[in-house]
Amino acid sequence: MYRIMDAEEIEINKIDNLKMIHIYDLSGSAIGSENVTSLAVYYGDNKQKNLCAMDKHYNLLVERVLYLYSRLEDKSSIMMDEATKNMIDVAMGSEDDCILAVSKLGKRYLSWDGEEVPRVNNQTYIRLTTMPMIRYYLTEIYSMLEVPIEFKEDKLGWHGNVILEASSGDKDIIFPIRFDYDSVNSYSVHIGNFLKEKSVIVFDISYGERQLTVNFTSEDAGLLGQSSFIFDKTGGLSKTSISINDTLVYYQDTAIAEAKVEDVSSFVHMGVLELLSQNVRISRLPWNSYYMFGYTENVTKDICRTDYDTGYIDCNEDAVLVRQYGVSHIENKSTGLNIKTNGSMMERLMPDKKNAGIQTCFYPVGYYSSWDYKNNLENKYFYEELKEK
């Protein structure tokens, strides 16, 4: 899809005829969290580009360089120091080396005829599968303010908006809800009649490979809050803070509860979750959604490649929406420098649990992939019927 690009993005996309690649530490510090991985590229007729990991288009530069390098027949024509070459060689890998679960499943679709336009509007089902989260946060906030509330069934309204019905004591409440979509991984939820008529609270929800963040704000009520769910190899951590009129009234961080494959398979068709294995750690979010985390490490000399498979399972009584991510981190253990590659993001939607049809889409992620992800899968939709359990 065409879009307006900024000048630097266009410049990077036009890079060609590589002459030299150099990965280095911008900070010059010792190994540790202070290291800032940077990439310098020399190309064309005495042109160069130099960005660090904190720059806006750094990942695009890495992607472009790896793409060009992968197309070279004579890779020895590119000047690189030994540390850079070792990282680049591991990042490139071969198609058979790619062990990410998303990649394995994606290769199954390479021979399929993908469609450019979805048959099912996923935004409709994002609204449905997000409602358990919204009900959870509204219940918690009302409880904190000592206002009793009980929710009824949510309903789709005009133009795909949602009407959420509740009661507080002997009073009925109708929450009109509107969604604004920023990207496939982030959106805002505007909820009316919060605490009082015509008062509004806004939830900004952002899904990341290893972090889910929910920011909520009500200017009418003077309320500001943030809830983060952070995941790594050792487990998950939840952090929540809430302020009212600039005064901190709530703060808590706690470990996220773990779950088993059987907890998920009891209500979700495993055909949607065929990437789920016993080697994946599953975390249960407070509104009974789930997060999956799996990784594999491979160390060669000083280079450690870690392949991450992560994802979210959101659902309500009728529909299931799965966001699954794959990415490889290539790190030089001696220098602490690292780059990312083999990026992929897959969304699987089952609109109706009773009719086991599934819509699968692969989205752009901004990382180089050493297989045919971008050419044959990216921005395409695939359809299949799942067999009964």
Image (tube, rainbow, N blue to C red):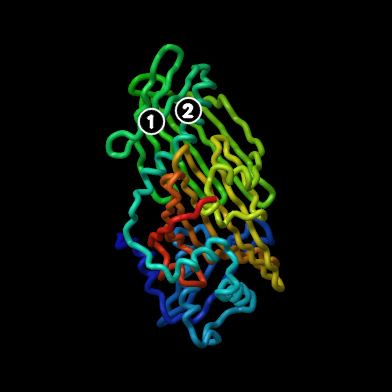
Q: Position of residue 30 (x, y in %)?
A: 69, 61
Residue type at mark 1?
Ile
Circles 1, 2 touching at the beta carbon (< 8 Å): yes
Secondary structure at numbered mark 2: helix
Residue type at mark 2?
Leu
Of the pair 60 and 386, the residue shown nearer to us: 386
Of the pair 220 and 168, the residue shown nearer to us: 168
Q: Position of residue 334 (x, y in %)?
A: 70, 67
Secondary structure at numbered mark 1: strand
* Pointer 2 residue: 138
328 in relation to 42, above or below: above
Q: Is residue 126 left or right of residue 37?
A: left
Identity of the residue furthest to the front in this view? 388
217 in relation to 289, above or below: above
Mark 2 crowdedness (10 Å alpha carbons): few <14, some 14-19, many ≥20: some
The disc label shown at residue 191, or none: 1
First in sequence, mark 1 or 2: give its number: 2
Mark 1 crowdedness (10 Å alpha carbons): few <14, some 14-19, many ≥20: many
Q: Position of residue 233 (x, y in %)?
A: 67, 52
Q: Position of residue 124 (x, y in %)?
A: 36, 43
Of the pair 156 and 350, the residue shown nearer to us: 350
What's the residue at 37%, 34% (across, down)?
A: 190
- Residue 238 falls in which quadrant of the image? top right
Q: Estimate the spatial distance between the alpha carbons at disc 1 and disc 2, rounded to whole Å.
A: 10 Å
What's the residue at 61%, 66% (across, down)?
A: 330
Identity of the residue furthest to the top in this view? 170
The disc label shown at residue 77, or none: none
